[in-house]
Image (cartoon, rainbow, N blue to C red):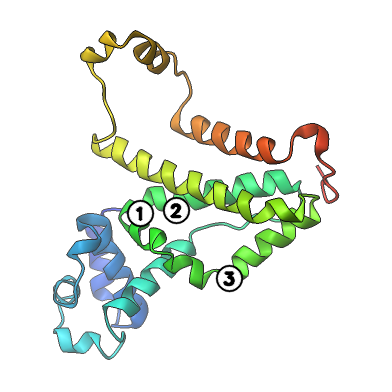
Amino acid sequence: MTAGNPSIEDTQALAAEPMSRDKVVHAALAVIDREGLGALNMRRLATELDVTGGLLYHYVDNKADILQSVAALVLREVKVPDDKGSWRQWAIELTTSFREAFVRHPNVLPLMMDGLPRRMSTRAYSRSVEVLIDGGVPRELVSTMMEGLEAIAIGHAMYSSAALRGTAPDFGEGGQNFSPLHDALSAVAMTADERFHACITALLDGFVPPEQRSDRKDRT
């Protein structure tokens, strides 16, 4: 099933699948992607699957159970890098993949803000800590660095989603009355992906400047 609005083929394929917990969770994500988190309830989900509401309870406990499974489904789209490069490249690739998952599913972001995925991703967070410390990042900086990377990824995903919907800040022609601001916005030559990369590399360099890196496991 593709991310975002499902195609006719996706809908037909979903309908043809035998009922299962996985089918229910994918249908829930499809509703959230199209209509927003607030649109999801058991009745709406039953309509999406063309079944009775009571049947859903054979596969899920309640709405909270569904939301937890939806968050886990989106997190499975995050690709964990291999260990062939430096800790810094590892962090960049992981943070980029994390951001891309939520750009594909922006309506799931409130679950992230609620902390739900963190409770399900202890192993992934633990692995991140290991890679950073083994790479030479001072132990006392690791937690704050990870928090900063996550904040940038979530914030940038929210901003990218708003831009796609046309609801991001737009100063328009009137912005010319604020010359420095207008000039700064007009001077931006980077794509959204390039701006995101610039933000996370600046954060990493701020925590561990190039001249202070030991990169004990840097095999590039």
- Look at the numbered disc 1 and give the secondary structure of its residue: loop
Q: Amino acid at mark 1?
A: His
Image position, residue 64 (x, y; %):
31, 77
Q: Position of residue 79 (x, y in %)?
A: 56, 57
Q: Pointer 1: what residue?
A: 105
* Left or right: residue 10 compared with residue 46: right
Quadrant, the C terminus: top right
Marks 2 & 3, CB-CB < 8 Å contact: no
The quarter of the rendered structure image containing the N terminus is bottom left
Give the answer, above or below, for where 108 lies relative to 68: above
Whether the residues at callouts 3 and 1 have beta carbons within 8 Å, the answer is no
Identified at 27% across, 57% down, the residue is 33
Is 106 placed above or below 159 here?
below
Left or right, 211 with respect to 74, comes to right
Q: Position of residue 18 (x, y in %)?
A: 29, 82
Label disc, if present, on residue 122 of the rendered structure: 3
Q: Residues within 10 Å of mark 2 (few under 14, many from 20)?
A: many
- Compared with 187, 76 (above or below) is below
The reply to whether callout 2 and callout 1 are in contact (CB within 8 Å) is: yes
Q: Is residue 7 visible?
A: no
**Amino acid of disc 3:** Thr
Mark 1 Cα within 10 Å, few/some/many (few <14, many 20+)?
many
Residue 57, quarter of the rendered image: bottom left
Res 47 quadrant in image: bottom left
Q: Is residue 33 left or right of residue 109?
A: left
* Residue found 17% across the figure and 77% down from its top: 46
- Residue at the far front in the pictured view: 140
Q: How far apart are the alpha carbons under marks 2 and 1? A: 6 Å
